[in-house]
Image (cartoon, rainbow, N blue to C red):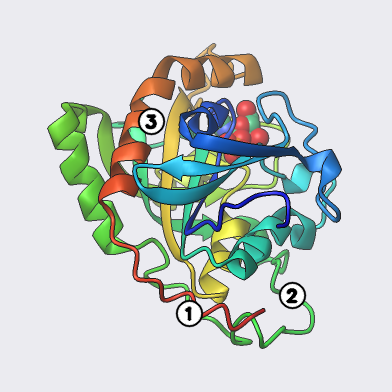
Amino acid sequence: MSQTKHRPQVAIICGSGLGMLADTLKCQDSFAYSDIPGFPQSTVQGHAGRLVFGELKGKTCVCMQGRFHMYEGHSLLKTTFPVRVFKLLGVETLFVTNAAGSLADGLQPGDIMIIKDHVNFPGLVGLNPLCGPNDDKFGPRFPAMSGCYDKNLRCLAMEIAKQLGVAGLMQEGVYAMVGGPNFETIAEARLLHRLGVDAVGMSTAPEVVVATHCGLRVFGLSLITNKVVKSYEDSDSVNHEGVLEVGRLRSHTVQQLVTELIGRMEINNNNTNNAA
Ligand SMILES: O=P(O)(O)O[C@@H]1C[C@H](O)[C@@H](CO)O1
């Protein structure tokens, strides 16, 4: 921390192809993950691997340009390590963004889903970053996860979307994390759809679990980059380049939404930082 004067209140984790969010920060100090002790390295295209500090609409932010995924071979403890670092830095609110495939018929590529809730499939079978001895300095052994995506921020995001004229692209929905790295089979896609999942991806849920455990307020967005193939008659096929391309096409809108939301949200300064 001696290398930056910024003391962030807000942390942003950028999903695949959404790293441009960091470019909006003013008065930047940026650090390659390879220069930060204990940080894993990014291995996925579209995840630059830089931690960027700066100002956005009067709030001090830190932005992860590149996240860590379980399928890269990192332990869940490693993939979520930055969230606890943010807590210790005094961050109060975590923004998570991701690229996801849609299962809901009403969600098209290019749409933006405000995450209302998640299904943490790895977590349901015991692959949870909170497994192992609990560190009481961060939070309780058995944290509640109901309400982990802050309702006030979700409402404010919708209000802002209306003012920006992009409400037609936006709706709330349930995100599910699967392990990846392969995309879903048709049978898996049908199962997820029947279970009430609106969009599926390979990240986010462990970060949100760790953030909620240590008392961070969370806001999440999924950029819908593709429709998940649910029919044996459908010859479409998803690929990572296509995912990144939709990210590029919608980068400006995602940037506007996040910037306005950060500018207008209140900071309570209720991060007592008692984990430090
Ligand atoms: O980091 P996110 O969840 O945005 O990345 C998604 C899931 C895979 O890593 C990749 C697939 O294209 O995009």
Residue corresponding to mark 1 = 144
Tell me the mark number nearer the camera, choosing from 2 and 3: 3
Label number found at residue 131: 2
Circle 2: residue type: Cys
Label 2 to label 3: alpha-carbon separation: 33 Å
**Residue 222 location (% of width, % of height):** 44, 39
- Measured along the vertical axis of the image, is residue 234 above or below residue 227? above
Q: CA distance from mark 2 to mark 1?
A: 15 Å
Q: Earlier in the sequence, mark 2 or mark 1?
A: 2
Q: Nearer the viewer, residue 203 or 264?
A: 264
Q: Is mark 2 within 8 Å of ligand 1?
A: no
Mark 1 crowd level (few <14, some 14–19, many ≥20, 10 Å Cα):
few
Identify the secondary structure beneath mark 2: loop
Q: Nearer the viewer, residue 229 or 138?
A: 138
Q: Quadrant of the N terminus?
A: bottom right
Between 128 and 30, the one lying in front of the other is 30
- Note whether ligand 1 is within 8 Å of mark 3: no
For the residue labelled by badge 1, is the local secondary structure a helix, a strand or a loop? loop
Name the residue beneath numbered marker 3: 254
In the rendered image, residue 32, in percent from the top left (x then y), is placed at: 77, 37
258 left or right, relative to 187: left
Of pointers 1 and 3, the one earlier in the residue sequence: 1
Residue at x-position 64% and y-position 21%: 240
**Three-letter amino acid code of the residue under disc 3:** Val
In this rendering, the answer to whether 213 lies above or below 185 is below
Asked whether residue 64 is in view, the answer is yes
**Toward which corner of the image does residue 169 lie, by quadrant?**
top left
Using the numbered discs, state the Cα–Cα distance from disc 1 to disc 3 in whole angstroms. Answer: 29 Å
